Amino acid sequence: MEKVYSKPRLLTDAVMHYCPGCSHGTIHKIVAEVIAELGIESSTIGVSPVGCSVFAYKYIDIDWIQAAHGRACAVASAVKRLEPEKMVFTYQGDGDLSAIGTGETIHACNRGENIAVIYVNNAIYGMTGGQMAPTTLVGMKTSTSPGGREVNIHGYPFKVADMVAQLEGVCYVTRQSVHTPASVRKAKKAIRLAFENALAGKGLSFVEVVSSCNSGWKMSPVGANEWMEQNMFPFYKLGDIKV
């Protein structure tokens, strides 16, 4: 019998805490594959913040630092400056990066820190109970916007990738997804390019992954993927934004 799949060697055997259908597990897998394929596991440092991805360090067998809520880009900037030969990346959700972490993110991008930022956007606060996030779509219902997000009250959803693409210190910005095998391959290619850019000292690379949160959205995994395709992708358009 032909073997068609092997678990990435950098993925640990820890049982993942993510909800069934969550995109984080797939993104962890391709991050682990990229690091192993580049042969940089002994020189890579990941920075994980607060939120659903807080336990990223349990699943990918590299060195990790946990940052305070929203401060991952600031911590990664310091690590890279102290250890310039290391590959440094952050792994952050939208509630972390685009809310409390907006300032740190923008200034790290503007400085052109030689790091990679992986930004998981599921348009909701998943860990803390499904509250409205800066990325929540107009009309989207959450526990803190039960009638749907209203522009005159809550403002517009925050397109972080489009914004940071305007900053000169950012060399690569892309928005991908992992809901189909083809999209997983594209996302993996994007993350690998982001890591290669950081290693080459080209500046900051920003990879947004539009994701589902079937628990927060109160949907089945299949229904959440369909809703994401119909509602998230028209607003958060997939593809390269800056190369």
Image (cartoon, grey):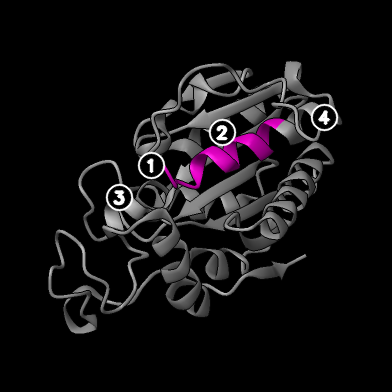
- In the rendered image of this protein, does residue 76 appear above or below residue 196? above
* Kind of residue at badge 2: Ala
- Quick check: is 29 in the magenta stretch? yes
Nearer to us: label 3 or label 4: 4
Residue of label 3:
215
Q: Are marks 2 and 4 in contact (CB under 8 Å)?
A: no
Residue of label 1:
70
Could you tell me how far apart the alpha carbons at marks 3 and 2 are, in whole angstroms? 30 Å
* Kind of residue at badge 4: Lys
- Quick check: is 242 in the magenta stretch? no
Q: Quadrant where the C terminus lies?
A: bottom right
Q: Are marks 1 and 4 in contact (CB under 8 Å)?
A: no
Residue of label 2:
76
Question: In the shown orientation, is residue 23 left or right of residue 125?
Answer: right
Depth check: give the residue in front, 221 or 45: 221
Bounds of the magenta span? 20-32
Nearer to us: label 3 or label 1: 3
Question: In the shown orientation, is residue 235 left or right of residue 33?
Answer: left
Question: In the shown orientation, is residue 16 left or right of residue 148?
Answer: right
